[in-house]
Image (cartoon, helix red, strand yellow):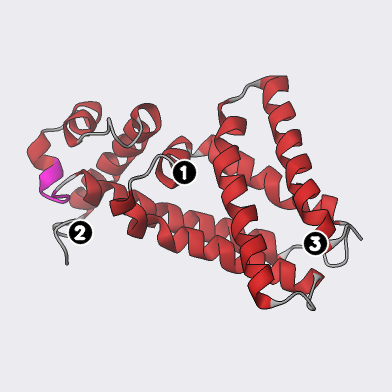
Amino acid sequence: MGEDSVRRLPQGERGRRRVALILEAAEQELAESGYEQFTTNAVAARAGISIGSIYQFFPNKEALVQALAARYHETIRKLYDDLFSGLPKGQPLARTVDYLIDPLVGYNARNRAFQALFCPILVPLRMSGAVAQVRSEVISRVHGIFADRRPDLPPESRSICVLISVHAVEALLPLATDGEGEVKQDVVREIKRLLLAYLEPILGNA
C-alpha cells in the first residue's frame, strides 16, 4: 500500500468501532471545514481520541479522505443501481431529469461532506485519484441514458455532452444543498431548467 493508504486494517470489533468513530468524525469535520482546513488534529478532537489513535490506522489526512471516498463510492453505487435499474424507458426528458436529480439532491443533503470531497473546484489535483471511481461510475451510467435516447449520436459527441452534463450538475448541486426551504426548491428547479435547455436540442424531449 502507498503512504496515503490505510496503515492497518482493524482485526477485532473494538478496532472496527474505532475506525468507524474516526470516519464519522472525519466526515463531520470535512463537511464543516472543507478540505484545505481539514486536519487530523481536528478529527481527533471531534472524536474525543488521541491523534495517535488516528495514526494507528491512517497515516495522514489524505488517507482519511480516501477512506471516506471509498465509503461514498459504495453508497453512491447503491443509489445509482437503484435509480438506473428503475429508470422508466420512453418517458419525456424532463421526467428523466426529475427522476435523477431529486435523489441526488437528497443524497447530498444527507451526506454533507460529499460535496466538499467531490466538488472539482474544492478538491486538489493530488486527491483526484480518490474520487475518480465515483465520477467514472456517474459518467458510465449517463452514457447509457444518452445512448438509449440518441443511438445515432456519434460516440465522440456523446462523450463531450455527458462530460459537460455531469460536471455542470456536480458544480451546481452544492447550491441546492446549502439552500433552505423555498430557496432550495428554486435552485433545484433552475438546475433542472439549465440542464434541459442544454440537453433538449441534443436528446429531444419525447
User: Which segment did they paint magenta?
Assistant: 54-59
Residue at the right extreme of this rendering: 206
Residue 175 placement (x, y as % from top left): 59, 31
Residue 72 in the image, given as x and y percentages of width and height: 44, 52
Image position, residue 168 (x, y; %): 61, 47
Location of mark 1 (residue) = 119
Q: Quadrant of residue 121?
A: top left
Residue farthest to the left?
A: 52
**Closer to the camera in the image, 149 or 107:** 149
- Using the image, determine if residue 121 lies above or below residue 167: above
Residue drawn at x 74%, y 42% as measured from the top left: 194
Viewer-nearest of discs 2 and 3: 3
State the residue at coordinates (55%, 35%): 174
Q: Alpha carbon of mark 2 to alpha carbon of mark 1: how far?
A: 22 Å
**Horizontally, is 114 left or right of 10 in the view?**
right
Quadrant in the picture for residue 180:
top right
Label at residue 202: 3
Say if 3 sits above or below 101 in the image. below
Which quadrant, please, contains the C terminus? bottom right
The residue type indicated by label 3 comes to: Ile
Identify the amino acid type marked 1: Cys
Indicate the position of residue 196 as horizontal and vertical percent values.
79, 48
Earlier sequence position, callout 1 versus callout 3? 1
Q: Foreground mark, 1 or 3?
A: 3
Q: Find residue 51 and report its image quarter.
A: top left
Q: Residue at x 68, y 69 (%)?
A: 158
Looking at numbered disc 2 in the image, what kind of residue is underneath it? Answer: Ser
Q: Which numbered disc, 2 or 1, marks the residue that appears first in the sequence?
A: 2
- Give above or below for 116 relative to 137: above
| Magenta segment main secondary structure | loop
* Distance (Cα) linking label 1 and label 3: 26 Å
For marks 2 and 3, give the CA distance.
42 Å
